[in-house]
Amino acid sequence: MHPNAAFRCDDDPLAFVAAQGFAHIFGQTPAGPRVAHAPLLVTPAGTLMFHLARSNDLARHLDGLTALASVGGPGHYVSPNWYEEPAGNVPTWNYQAVEIEGRVRVLDTEALEALLHFAAATFEPRVGEDWTMHKMPRPKAEAMMRAITGFELVPTAIRTTLKASQNRSAADVAGVLAALDRLGETRGAAAIRAARGEGTTT
């Protein structure tokens, strides 16, 4: 996470994780560090659940491992030309991210199936659809589940970054906002305004 304390975020980090719904999951294996990319669900208990293909390089090493899930949100490039004094500045990037560190355990078959139902119930409405596991013939569903492994990560540390020009002067921020509005970068502009107490992110 960014070392500047100005970029810490007081919002609920797990709410951000749930809204984004996708993570890079890092772990150390005997062959070296590996990363998996997977949908990530936040449970009512505040744990994280996900599944990977059994053939994934990381999957067979995760049980009992301390892993790191990194969840990123919208971000954008910032040109020095947008600041009051371009010659005295360098390019940067605004972004939002949450890191969750914790011990991982493998889910049994019953818990894996519950995870898949939970995933469909979470993500299908976001795209206006209604697919469920029940629409798949049971033998096919069981075969598909045998090809994947479900996991639960219990957070032991959560770190956040919301880099939204909080360290810039009012004049610099005005220049950045004008540029983002001109480019149609509405989410980046909204994040800056929200960080300054001028609205909410979209």
Image: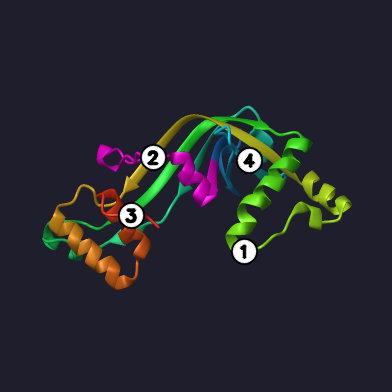
| Mark positioned earlier in the residue sequence (1 or 4) | 4
At 46% across and 46% down in the image, what residue appears?
Answer: 16
| Sequence order check, earlier mark of 3 and 4 | 4
Residue 36 placed where, x, y %? 59, 46
The kind of residue tagged 1 is Gly
Q: Which mark is residue 191?
A: 3
Q: CA distance from mark 2 to mark 3?
A: 15 Å
* Tag nearer the camera, 2 or 1: 1
Question: Disc 1 versus disc 4: distance between alpha carbons?
Answer: 32 Å
What SS does tag 4 mark?
loop
Q: Which residue is tagged 2? A: 160
Residue 28 point in image, percent of width and height:
56, 34
Amino acid type assigned to the residue bearing label 2 in the image = Thr
Element type at mark 1: loop
Name the residue that disc number 1 marks.
Answer: 128
Judge whether residue 108 is colored magenta.
Answer: no
Q: Quadrant of the C terminus?
A: bottom left
Label 4 close to label 2 by CB (< 8 Å): no
Q: Which residue corresponds to the image point at 48% horizontal and 36% vertical from the top-left?
A: 100
Q: Is residue 43 left or right of residue 149?
A: left
Q: Residue at x 59, y 38 (%)?
A: 43
Highlighted range, magenta: 1-25
Q: Is residue 150 above or below residue 79?
A: above
Q: Sort mark 1 into few (<14), some (14-19) or many (20+) by Cα contacts within 10 Å.
A: few
Q: Is residue 172 visible?
A: yes
Give, as a three-letter code, the residue at label 3: Ala
Q: Earlier in the sequence, mark 2 or mark 1?
A: 1
| Residue under pointer 4 | 58
Q: Single out the mark in the foreground, 1 or 4.
A: 1
